[in-house]
Image (cartoon, rainbow, N blue to C red):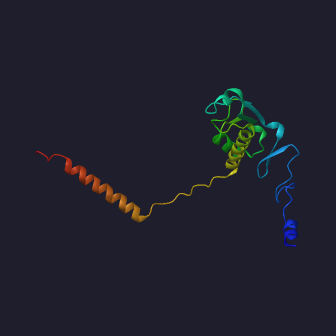
């Protein structure tokens, strides 16, 4: 009886969570409200470097993900932040190129590339807080001036006495 009640309250995994719009059938959700077409993301596999013995020489497991930055639906401010965050990964054609060769598995490296893309997009969506200018406290001003006087006195004592 208890088991049946729990089963009824489980969310349907085939449906997106509440508040998330249905992505297109071939769409890839990069962040809440940011969905790109699956055809815009190109993933290729190339020979990997590093450890792995003969496996490295025989298998192309390094995943390279390419997506045009213009194909990612972002506001202008978020797009500017994305260019700043991914400046070393954006080539001259405006493509964001991410690669992963962490594992010997193509599927895990593909997943790692997608996770990195999602992380960069999520970080670009975060609006940085504006810095509020603050005045130094009276105590900090006093301490700074006292340390300057102390340092000046130390340097003055190092000088040779005047010969006048």
Residue at the top extreme of this rendering: 57
| Quadrant (top left/top right/bottom left/bottom right) for the N terminus | bottom right
Q: Residue at x 76, y 38 (%)?
A: 70
Residue at the front extreme of this rendering: 54
**Can the viewer see residue 95?**
no
Q: Is residue 105 left or right of residue 151?
A: right
Residue 58 position (above or below residue 11): above
Q: Position of residue 85 (x, y in %)?
A: 64, 42
Residue 60 position (above or below residue 159): above
Q: Quadrant of residue 93?
A: top right
| Quadrant (top left/top right/bottom left/bottom right) for the C terminus | top left
Q: Residue at x 67, y 30 (%)?
A: 56
Q: Position of residue 59 (x, y in %)?
A: 72, 29
Q: Quadrant of residue 61?
A: top right
How many numbered dots are placed on residues in this image? 0
Instruction: Judge by depth and name the residue closer to the eye, 70 or 18.
Output: 18
Instruction: Judge by depth and name the residue closer to the eye, 146 or 109.
Output: 109
Q: Residue at x 72, y 41 (%)?
A: 108
Q: Residue at x 72, y 35 (%)?
A: 63
Q: Position of residue 64 (x, y in %)?
A: 71, 34
Q: Is residue 25 left or right of residue 153?
A: right
Residue at the left extreme of this rendering: 164
**Can the viewer see residue 2?**
yes
Instruction: Judge by depth and name the residue closer to the eye, 85 or 103.
Output: 103
């Amino acid at each position: 009886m208890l088991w049946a009640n729990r089963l009824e309250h489980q969310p349907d995994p085939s449906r997106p969570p509440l508040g998330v719009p249905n992505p297109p059938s071939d769409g890839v959700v990069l962040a809440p409200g940011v969905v790109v077409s699956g055809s815009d993301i190109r993933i290729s596999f190339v020979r990997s470097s590093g450890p792995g013995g003969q496996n490295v020489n025989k298998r192309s497991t390094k995943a390279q993900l390419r997506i045009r930055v213009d194909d990612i639906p972002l506001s202008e401010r978020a797009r500017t932040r994305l260019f700043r965050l991914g400046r070393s990964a954006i080539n001259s054609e405006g493509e964001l190129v991410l690669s992963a060769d962490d594992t010997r598995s193509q599927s895990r490296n593909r997943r790692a590339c997608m996770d990195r893309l999602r992380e960069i997009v999520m970080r670009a969506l975060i609006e940085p807080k504006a810095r509020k200018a603050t005045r130094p406290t009276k105590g900090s001003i006093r301490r700074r001036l006292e340390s300057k006087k102390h340092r000046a006195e130390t340097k003055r004592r190092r000088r040779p006495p005047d010969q006048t």
